[in-house]
Image: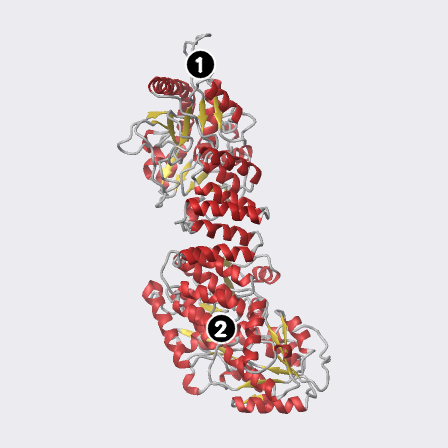
Amino acid sequence: MATTKKLFGEANAPYYIYAPPYEENSGGVRAMHYLCHALNLAGEEAYVLTDKVADKLRTPSLTDPIIQRHTTTGVEPIVVYPEVTRDNPLGLRNVARFLLNIPGFLTGEKTDWQPSDMIFSLSMEIIPQGMKGDLLELPLIDSSIYWPPKPEEEKREGTLLFVNRFFKRGGVQLPVTEQSTEISFRVERRSPEELAELYRKAELLYTYEHSTACYEALLCGCPVIYIPNDIMLPERTSEYLGPDGSAWGLDPVDIETAKKSVFLAQKKYQALEEQFWSQLASFITTTQARARENKMTAPLARPRTATLDQAIARYNAADYEAATEMFSILLETDPEEALVYAYLAFICANQGLLEDAAAFIEQARQLSPERPELPAALGEVLLKAGYPKEAQKYLGMAVMQQSDFFGAYPALAESLRRNGNIAAAIELLESGAKIPSTAQQNIREVLLDMLRQRGDVAALAELCRRMQDEPDRHAEAIQLLADSGASPESIYPELESWIGRQRRHGETPAPCKQRPPRRPLLIGFLVSSFAPGIASARLEALLLHLPPKTFRTAVIDNSPTDKMTAITQRCFVLCDYWLSIDAMDDTAASEAIAALNIDVLIDMNGFDHRHRLNLLLGASAPFKASWSEILPWHCPGIIPIAGTALLNEIPTGVLPASIITLDGVGEIPPMPAISAGKTTQPGHPQFACLSPAGKIGAGDWRFFAQLLSAIPDSRLTINLEELAPPAAEFISDIFSGQGVAASRLAFISATSTSELCAAWKEADIGLAPLHGTGGQALATALWMNTPFIALASPLPWSCRPAALLRNSGLDHLIADSQAEYLKIAMHLAHEPQALERRPSLQASQKNAEKDFAHNFGKALINTCFGQAK
């Protein structure tokens, strides 16, 4: 670099590079550190404002002694900010901005720059219109690592994928990139050497956004294909290294051109490395001239050694010692900044120094009494730190100051819950959930969770019903209404509304002609839960035993849970096709399902949260069926699947014209090998309702309280399943309100058939809820030779308990009314001897799975394709 130096002349102003901690996987961060390194190599004095630096770079960290030395000697530095810095946090006059991207593109914030700020840019294309700047094409890629293979050694296969912010903003991956190896750091952090090796072997790099990875690939001879979308600008594909080696879109001609021109990008980078040093010399000349000019016209500006952003960053990194030191410095430089006192309060709260936290937050409130978010934020910190009592105090203080400060409602409700006042927590959230606000969705989600924990089925149903704008919530409301005993007159209109909404939103299936018979038929199973139980047992039996000459199987996996569970892995091995759609939006999922060309699409789980039955409604399969107890009975085009025992319980007028009819009750209870011996105490009838409490309404609990009142020495075991302790309190309060002491209740948490069977060993008499299917409780009760009372119901969603009892020859345990239900229970309580034999359930288990699958296949073909098939 041609420049004149004077041994005894005035030294140039130092550079403070406002760089984040060094991160190899971030091109923007590397660029700021590279600039500091280059300035030092050029003979200048440059520092970065971070302790985390790269060993291979000459990037000394800025320290307080260095700043003090500069101030004492009258040296005013030049600060260089990246384009993501909105204002001038160091408060210096000599400000340079280095544009690595379009200002505000990444942060979405408006800039607060001054006309005197000097602008330098990595590319002229990213300088906003009306702003003037100079070019500083800093080499971003380490060409000692990223280089192309020798022509004679080059052998490319496979493709790579870079994507990050695109998915975070709701973008959907195209099928062409699904098999690509993803190199984004969100998936796996690879070393530069590992990435370079991948680039040198790959045929293409697909990208959904601009990234330094594109330039790394080009230097390794790997063409880059930009996938058009709304967060990527087409003109930026030509910046920096030009259009050579890249293609905008998936046109085969453009991709072939990119392959043939990639070597030109490498040559341009070589030229860029050479010309950078002359651009850097111009950068130094311009910035030093500005520093000399400012020194002559105004007094020296002392930099703020600790910025609020830096101090907050230290706090967020849980580096409380460094954060405390920086906030203490800020107290001296800006003692009127309320946020400084607030963050010191947060630090004290995290360390258990509650009195100090109280003192700091009080000072913050005095400085900014109009900001309720400060005590609210302290309350959230205290809540996370395990101090719910103190958290409630400050969150309540914020809400008292500003009643519509809805952002504080969820945390205040959680502190109330932890302090044992869940009723007040729910009341608070319910008040906020009814009022439109930016926090309304979050309030609703927290309220849903609390109502689930409490087991308040009716309130949960009402909240989900109010959230009809979310199809999965509306579907959940319909199921909860059925569980809580709502009348068919209230359920069917909700169901019709839900179906109509799906069709208005474009899920109406395209006209589909019945395909000619073919062998084998492809059955698609839409699965939203692989939880152990009847539905999973059905699926596994069908995948295992349906004859492959007649059927092929596809599992459409909509379950958000761990894919490595035993049942999921077994189903994965057994099926012919597996399609995961839980991460897809409805449009992508529908297209993927249609691509399978399914003959019969079957919903395995029915109504519940996240089950996405709109995909079933909208599918174009010739035949669609469901095991749901609600949907197919009132939805044209969806065929019910049911056992003959269940159909016998339903009045003829309710039955649709087409049904896939199975033998018996049409299910396989997955039973364990366990003794049916009892461990109950004579003289104290032990009733048990082991159906999940989260599916039982308050009306049922009041009915069971009436039963316990009629038999004073009796007790009741209730299965919370996965509910939290507040549910036990909620249920106990209902019984107490009916005059039944909570001490007569016992709560268990049984989820598997083994746990249910073990619980039945300690029960004399089983009680079916008045509404709903009863889950696995009835089948396990019969397996354990426990008398089980059920109420007859003509409703499809409530007739299963009576159907299973009747199918097992236990008609005398079926009540036609609630009064008869009580009569049967009282009779059994006074004659609590066990049944003489187990029902036929055990005998039917020997070949149950094979028989079930055979029966299902035969019934499906007869119903959908006629006997000829």
Q: CA distance from mark 1 to mark 2?
A: 76 Å
Residue drawn 45% across and 33% down? 333
Query: Which residue is outermost to the left?
Result: 130
Question: Dot 1: within a 10 Å radius of its alpha carbon, few (fewer than 14), some, or many (20 or more) residues?
Answer: few
Q: Nearer the viewer, mark 1 or mark 2?
A: 1
Residue 197 is left or right of residue 82, and the answer is right
| Vertical placement of residue 815 versus 324, above or below | below
What label sits on residue 11 in the rendered view? 1
Quadrant location of the N terminus? top left
> Observer-nearest residue: 756 or 643?
756
Residue drawn 53% across and 63% down? 417
Residue drawn 30% across and 34% down? 128
| Sequence-first disc among 1 and 2 | 1
* Secondary structure type for disc 1: loop
Q: Position of residue 793 (x, y in %)?
A: 49, 85
Q: Is residue 68 visible?
A: yes
Number of marks: 2
Question: Dot 2: within a 10 Å radius of its alpha carbon, few (fewer than 14), some, or many (20 or more) residues?
Answer: many
> Observer-nearest residue: 259 or 670?
670
Q: Amino acid at mark 2?
A: Val
Q: Position of residue 161 (x, y in %)?
A: 46, 42
* Secondary structure type for disc 2: helix
Q: Position of residue 289 (x, y in %)?
A: 35, 17
Q: Is residue 521 visible?
A: no
Q: Position of residue 445 (x, y in %)?
A: 46, 61
Can you tell which quarter of the image residue 530 is in? bottom right
Write down the residue under mark 2.
457
What label sits on residue 776 in the rendered view? none
| Vertical placement of residue 579 versus 789, above or below | above
**Are the residues at dot 1 and dot 2 in contact (C-beta closer than 8 Å)?**
no
Q: Amino acid at mark 1?
A: Ala
> Observer-nearest residue: 714 or 326?
326
